[in-house]
């Protein structure tokens, strides 16, 4: 269907071109994460709900979707934008084809400006950039944070080992949020906040929800908390109920989606005449 035909069909309320493929993850019966690719059809407007007009391009009809449970969170207002979902990836193809409201670009290597620039160039959503905390620290992290701001980052993320003194220096050097990662109840999260961290990013594995509840009880209701949501809608909901304002979602890798898609193609080919 051409763009002109799609525009014409809009005037007749023909929404068939809105069909798209949703790529999500879920746990199977063996408690392992599996990729689900499903065709999503346009829904009929319900009288009790507001109708949301939509547009979907033909060639960009496959989307990595964050779990719907994330939108139960309050969100965090950052530079005028209310953010509830953060995509935890540096895969530019995933970033370009996702409905997440923002990106958390943290990776297990020394932060580099070329990587920051590549992600910022691709993403149409706000990006929060990692500036070290383990191997990379001190003046180098401060400089990276300043450069991240100049490149257009919405905030910088420091890893759990980052010293409080460096957090303070970063806070003094930039005018975008400093997000401090907390990985266990033994981290000095109070010290991080007192040193200038504007938000906490809680990543405690299977114990994240309990850690969020503990920290929320100590820091009060106003400190912004981002947290990993876990593998299911239930774990995401529990994390939000524990006090998280926004949730990070780890999407499947491109090669995993490709493998699932090829399997789907092979299965579909069996049913062709």
Image: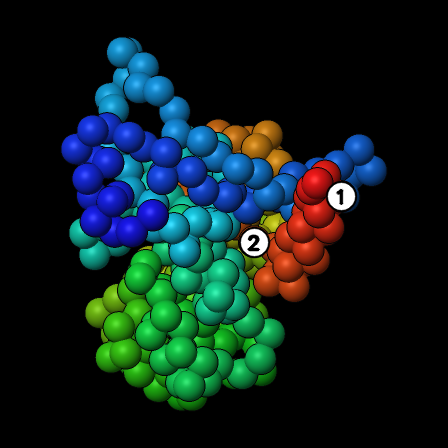
Of 68 and 195, nearer the camera is: 68
Q: Residue at x 43, y 49 (%)?
A: 61
Q: Which residue is mark 2?
A: 251
26 sits left or right of 194 in the view = right
- Quote the CA–CA distance across marks 1 and 2: 29 Å
**Residue 144: x, y in percent?**
38, 83
Which image quadrant is residue 207 in?
A: top right
Q: Secondary structure at mark 1?
A: helix
Q: Residue at x 48, y 50 (%)?
A: 62
Mark 1 or 2, nearer chain start: 2
**Residue 63: x, y in percent?**
47, 49
Quarter containing the C terminus: top right
- In the rendered image of this protein, does residue 154 appear above or below residue 16? below
Of 217 and 72, nearer the camera is: 72
**Residue 267: x, y in percent?**
73, 44
Tag 2: Cα neighbours inside 10 Å, few (<14), some, or many (≥20)? many
Of 16 and 182, nearer the camera is: 16
**Residue 98: x, y in percent?**
44, 53
196 sits left or right of 255 in the view = left
52 sits left or right of 159 in the view = left
Q: Which residue is mark 1?
A: 270
Can you tell which mark lies on residue 84?
A: none
């Amino acid at each position: 269907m051409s763009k002109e035909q799609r525009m014409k069909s809009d005037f007749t309320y023909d929404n068939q071109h809105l069909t798209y493929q949703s790529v999500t993850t879920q746990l199977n019966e063996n408690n392992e994460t599996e990729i689900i690719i499903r065709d999503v059809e346009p829904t009929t407007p319900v009288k009790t709900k507001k109708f949301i007009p939509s547009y979907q391009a033909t060639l960009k009809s496959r989307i990595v979707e964050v779990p719907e449970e994330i939108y139960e969170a309050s969100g965090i207002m950052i530079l005028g934008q209310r953010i509830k979902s953060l995509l935890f990836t540096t895969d530019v193809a995933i970033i370009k084809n996702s409905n997440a409201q923002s990106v958390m670009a943290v990776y297990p290597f020394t932060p580099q400006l070329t990587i920051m620039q590549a992600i910022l160039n691709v993403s149409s959503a706000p990006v929060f950039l990692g500036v070290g905390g383990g191997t990379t620290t001190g003046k180098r992290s401060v400089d990276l944070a300043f450069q991240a701001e100049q490149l257009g980052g919405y905030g910088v993320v420091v890893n759990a080992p980052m010293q409080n003194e460096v957090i303070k220096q970063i806070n003094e050097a930039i005018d975008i949020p400093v997000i401090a990662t907390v990985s266990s109840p033994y981290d000095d999260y109070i010290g991080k906040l007192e040193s200038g961290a504007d938000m906490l990013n809680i990543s405690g594995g299977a114990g994240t929800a309990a850690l969020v509840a503990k920290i929320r009880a100590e820091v009060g209701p106003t400190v912004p908390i981002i947290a990993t949501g876990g593998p299911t809608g239930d774990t995401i909901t529990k994390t939000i109920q524990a006090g998280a304002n926004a949730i990070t979602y780890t999407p499947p890798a491109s090669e995993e989606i490709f493998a699932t898609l090829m399997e789907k193609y092979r299965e579909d080919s069996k049913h062709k005449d």
